[in-house]
Image (cartoon, rainbow, N blue to C red):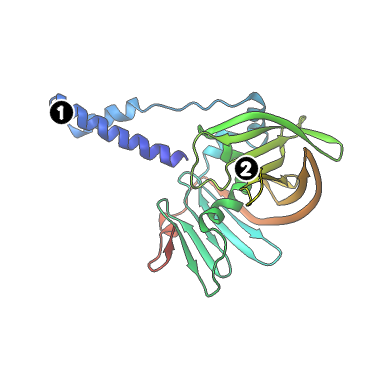
Amino acid sequence: MTKNLIIISIFSLLIFSCKQAETKEEVPVEEIEETIMSEEPKIQMVFPESIDKLFEAHGGLDRWNALGHLSFRLNKSRSNESYQLNLQTGKSLVQGSDFIIGDDGEYVWLKEYGKPFKSDVRFYSKFHAYFMMMPFVLADENTVFTRAAAVKYQGTLYPGYRVSFREHHENIPVDEYYIHFNPKTYRMEWLGYTMPKKPGSNENKVLMVRYRDLKVVDGVLLPNSLTWHRYRDGVIGSKTNAVRFSDIELSNDPLATELFEMPEGVKAY
């Protein structure tokens, strides 16, 4: 999302420079660059008070925005996958036992090793990474927070917000989230998300994920594991699935751009 805004801003500045050249005398290139940099607008993001407290409870946006990359392993029942992401650019690399999915900032690409990859490549490239990066990935000027009804689990109510987006972005795997938090600590404990409608269905299905097993990594609260639960009419039910994360690392330094470059002969999406 943010990288698209940067591209649009650069494009707008180029148009502005061309118009200035048509009506004024030539100005040295150095002088134009200084003027553009000094007039670049800063976007101030404003969130509901409860959401501000939630971000702080997970380590704070200042700390998250200072980070350069995130890496971790996803341990599923039948396979393990490694994830590497540059947090400032959105470039990523997912490596499984029989595939590699990369995002070089322009294309999402797939390299297969014998066994065909059956999931949606673009959707899968960021799906699990978004769960790891919650709630920080929702701190964006494109995000809209609307009060939602509280959900109940084992007699406890968790207040929350519906999270939607002003504009759809192709790299966001889900169009709508529900974020629910502990009213005392403001830590996010439940994350709901919608799945696309199935043929013949009149409504989206909401899936609910529990964030309970958390740990501090370099000043930021991240999940050790996640569990999926049944959900119906505001009531969260029994567990249906679980994944574990390991080798979680954060760093202020970004990973080398070459890591995400698309090899020759692979499929691009």
Residue under the image location 59 percent in, 27 percent down: 47
For label 1, the residue is 22
Nearer-the-camera pick, 201 or 160: 201
Pick out the residue farthest to the left.
25
Q: Residues within 10 Å of mark 1 (few under 14, many from 20)?
A: few
Nearer-the-camera pick, 131 or 39: 131
- Residue 210 % position (x, y): 74, 45
Nearer-the-camera pick, 217 or 86: 86
How many numbered badges does the structure rendering display? 2
Q: Is residue 165 visible?
A: yes
Residue under the image location 44 percent in, 59 percent down: 259
Q: Is residue 159 visible?
A: no
Say which amino acid is labelled 2. Met
- Residue 212 % position (x, y): 75, 45
Nearer-the-camera pick, 83 or 195: 195
Secondary structure beneath dot 2 equals loop
Return the disc, 2 or 1, that comes first in the chain's sequence.
Answer: 1
Pick out the residue farthest to the bottom.
114
Say which amino acid is labelled 1. Glu
Q: Nearer the viewer, mark 2 or mark 1?
A: 1
Q: Which mark is residue 56?
A: none
Q: Is residue 224 above or below residue 13?
A: below
Splitting the image into 4 quarters, where does residue 258 fall?
Answer: bottom left
Q: Which mark is residue 134?
A: 2
80 sits to left or right of 153: left
- Residue 211 % position (x, y): 72, 44
Pick out the residue farthest to the front.
200
Q: Residues within 10 Å of mark 2 (few under 14, many from 20)?
A: some
- Residue 187 % position (x, y): 71, 36
Q: Is residue 101 above or below residue 127?
A: below
Secondary structure beneath dot 1 equals helix
Q: CA distance from mark 2 to mark 1?
A: 47 Å
